[in-house]
Image (spheres, rainbow, N blue to C red):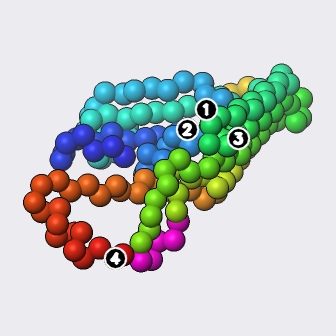
Amino acid sequence: MITLASNLRWVWVVDGVYRPRNGVGFGDLGELERIEVLKGPQGTLFGKNTSAGVINIVSLAPQFKFGSEVEILGGNYHALEGSASVTGPLIADKVAGRLFVARRERDGFLDISPGAGPRTDNQDGDRSFFYTGRGQLLLTPTENLNVRLIADFTQRNEVCCGGVQLAYGPSNLVPTLFAPP
């Protein structure tokens, strides 16, 4: 949820499910059908706390025609990312499936000195691993009934966003006196 002002809130919804945090809302979802930015308020359709609006993300449904996609990316700081998806019929004209998996890793890009505190990490912006998987089934028992089942799983080990302490002026002497050597 993004708070724009004390009483205005954007809400993230992925395939009809409310996502309480931005990081969860923008995880790897595989192929997307569309992203809707719905101007607020949207309380009637999406509940309270949507005074600014809703970011509605709709993923691509399973297809009854076989298809696949693979993506491999590399970057600086030993970044290595990959994802793959496959879709197709499981039972002709009755059940289709879609599976998406991804793995991402990257070394930290900010060296830090943790000092004598409880934190022992010496890098920030580090992604030791990030795994995600999303499976979907589309059931069409009759012409007038479609049932879509979606399950997703994500596991992360990331070190993010350590605050850099900067102090200017004469008050800079105070934290320096009490800082551990």
Tell me the CA gap for discs 2 and 1: 7 Å
Return the residue at label 2: 15
In the picture shown, does residue 29 fall above or below 171?
A: above
Return the residue at label 1: 59
Q: Say which of 30 and 79 sits in front.
A: 79
In contact (CB < 8 Å): disc 2 and disc 1: yes
First to last magenta residue range: 116-121
Tell me the CA gap for discs 1 and 3: 24 Å
Residue 33, position in %: x, y?
A: 60, 24
Secondary structure under tag 2 reads loop
Residue 179 lies in what quarter of the image? bottom left
Residue 32 lies in what quarter of the image? top right
Residue 44, position in %: x, y?
A: 32, 38
Quick one: label 2 or label 4, which is nearer the N terminus? 2
Q: Which mark is residue 180?
A: 4
Q: Is residue 142 left or right of residue 46?
A: right
Q: Is residue 130 left or right of residue 126?
A: right
Return the residue at label 3: 80
Kind of residue at disc 2? Asp
The label nearer to you, 4 versus 3, is: 4
Secondary structure under tag 4 reads loop
